[in-house]
Amino acid sequence: GVVDDFGASLQMAAYRVTLPRGGLDRSKWAGRPPPLAPEDLHTGPRSDGLLSTDEISGRYSAACSCTPAPTICPSMTVVPLGADTIETWRTGCVFFPPFIGPTAEGAVRTRNPGTNAFLNPQNPDPNSNLMTFSADGTAKSGCCCGYKKRRTSQKRAFHKVETRDLAGKWRGCGCSLFVQFWPFSFISCTTKKALDQDRYEVSEISCCLCLPCSDSGTRTRVYVNGLPTNRFDGGYDCCGKYIIHRYRDPGCAGGADFSRGHPPAGSSSFFAKKLC
């Protein structure tokens, strides 16, 4: 709308925003609208006949999968971020010589309008990388065998990882799935310090081929459609790869190369655990 400016040549625009039920804490949300409370995300039953994000949330597993690479015993967790947005976290073991090793891949997916298919907005091709969910508890991505929701699976709710809980000392390791590159695996020692709700500072020392390397910088939370995620922009590593760190919880993280919008087959994976 427009506020009455009493004849001034410039007009003032007024915008209406929805605040969280707990109110606005200026020390936390300066410069960014606060996210809605979980009960305000409208993830429950829908009136259009489509599956709600609450209904498809949970733990899934499969005997094998071909995305992002041929993987055996893959597992996937689906968490609702809104009525048409979900976050997925997939782990497994790639066995497609010469690509062998553990892998972890996280994605924030948005609903393809009018369907139960969710696309990865970071993939430049909107007609590929779709994941389709069915009422029988299956999830299929691509032309390979699909995931099946576990019988004991419970519905999941999004729990935002706070940067203050990430602060401390971490240890991690990374390796390439390409067997010939295994000698270039590395270990890292990282110290993290919270700056605000969406940023933390890192100071890292890693070792590869017995050669030390240091890195420091600021990591920023990734927002999708205005909704917060547990993914943080990891910046570019020494090889020019754009890394995103995804936190399963305040004590466990995984990372991958997102230089092309999604982890390419055979890319390196990174895992880290908080010590204190």
Image (cartoon, rainbow, N blue to C red):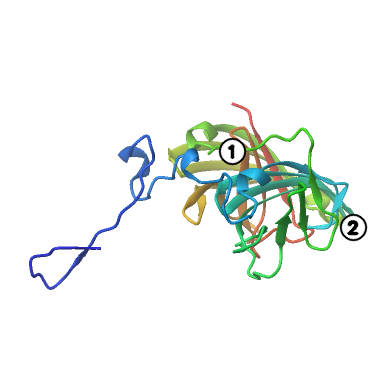
Q: How many marks?
A: 2
Q: Which mark is residue 98?
A: 2
- Provide the secondary structure element on which disc 2 rests: loop
The kind of residue tagged 1 is: Ala
Residue 248: where, in percent of width, then height?
64, 39
Q: Which mark is residue 84?
A: none
- Provide the secondary structure element on which disc 1 rests: loop
- Residue 231 seen in render: no
110 vs 204: above or below: below
Left/right of residue 30 with respect to residue 41 in the rendered view = left
Identify the mark nearer the N-term, 1 or 2.
Answer: 2
Looking at this view, name the residue that lies furthest to the left: 6
Which quadrant does the N terminus fall into?
bottom left
Quick one: 58 or 134, which is closer to the camera? Answer: 134
The kind of residue tagged 2 is: Pro
Left/right of residue 96 with respect to residue 165 in the rendered view = right
- Residue 42 seen in render: yes
Q: Residue at x 83, y 57 (%)?
A: 66
Left/right of residue 147 with respect to residue 193 in the rendered view = right
Quarter location, residue 252: top right
Quick one: 89 or 242, which is closer to the camera? Answer: 89
Q: Which residue is mark 1?
A: 157
Quarter location, residue 73: top right
Residue 227: where, in percent of width, then height?
49, 50
91 vs 8: above or below: above
Quick one: 163 or 182, which is closer to the camera? Answer: 163
Left/right of residue 111 with respect to residue 152 in the rendered view = left
Quick one: 179 or 76, which is closer to the camera? Answer: 76
